[in-house]
Amino acid sequence: MRLKKQLLGSLLVVIVVLSIAVATTKQQKGFVTGQPTGALNLSDILDSEELGEYHLMSAAIITGNTVDFSGLGAGPDDPFEIASITKIFTGELLRLQIERGEITESTAVGDVLGERVADSLIRDITVEELANHTSGLPRLGNVGLRPFMATFFDKNPYKDLSADRVISISTTSKLNSRGEFHYSNLGFALLGQVLARNAGLTFDQLLDRDLLAPLNLNNTKLMTPESLAQDAPQGFSTPGKQVEAWEMDGFLPAAGLRSTARDMAVFCQYLFTKGPAPFTWQSLESAPEIVWHNGESFGYSSVLFFNTATTTAIFVAADVATSVFPIGHELLMANSTRQESK
């Protein structure tokens, strides 16, 4: 037993040393920033120092039925991982099931999953708590050593986590500070699986039936295992290293979508008719009428701003894991100034 503990301690030391080495090693960036495209010139917003931080970028400013596209080396139909912006789509699936009377905000996980969760703490968690990050579930839960190690080497941490595994992880997780906001990818993954089971479908079937097909979002696709072509675009880590795509199964409802600026513009115009669903969006402290959500994977970053008062939305995505939140916010402010001057 003592030897086992010593070996485990040595392994942890090696992990820490490797992690520090990976985090501190400076690498030469493997890309050159793309040339400006579209009606808007994004490079006017970027400081000269920031230009070297990005490779390809695509953006859309949606004002009612009018859409202006722009980018750096990319057009409105180029795909980008949108990571956690996927949660907005999952939240919309919840709203649609509520509107159809198939579920309510107070429906509990146990009401849908039954005996599978009967002896666990999550049986009484409601879908509303999952959707608003107040369930008490941890960010990821006990996903195991391989996904944990993947995070240090820019590998896909969600690769081997099935829908059933998401449920299993959830049933063994402690609920900390239930009722308080704690961002949880596990909670949203569980929400998507509950919605899918409630509909008698897989999550990808449900998303296609209720949103992607009706809205003709033909270039918005879930990255299910082995679904991407070998020559599919790959993103870059912040040091400029090309990284593994986030194909997944169980965590699809939390972070599994690729989309384009054109498709996101269509989705925003759909939301203009309904307003954003009352789930997962966050409000700007300086302007509560503006809600937003961002997405970040190991090789992509994205952000979506939605002004509920003016039917205006801003979407920005880049194939580098450097946050585009400041750029999206600059576009939002610039567009507001432009609208006020008209």
Image: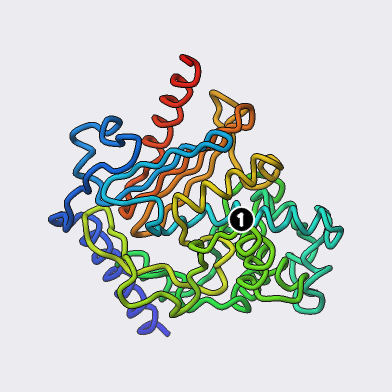
Q: Residue at x 30, y 31 (%)?
A: 45
The relative height of residue 289 versus residue 152 in the rendered view (above or below) is above
Q: Residue at x 72, y 68 (%)?
A: 194
Image coords of residue 4 (percent x, y):
38, 83
Q: Quadrant of the N terminus?
A: bottom left
Q: Nearer the viewer, residue 65 or 12?
A: 65
The relative height of residue 183 versus residue 231 in the rendered view (above or below) is above
Image coords of residue 106 (percent x, y):
83, 54
Q: Which of the 4 quarters of the picture holds residue 308?
A: top right
Q: Which residue is labeled 1 in the image? A: 89
Q: Residue at x 58, y 55 (%)?
A: 87
Tell me the element at label 1: helix
The relative height of residue 278 versus residue 150 in the rendered view (above or below) is above
Q: Nearer the viewer, residue 252 or 218?
A: 218
Q: Nearer the viewer, residue 113 or 340?
A: 340
Image coords of residue 335 (percent x, y):
45, 26
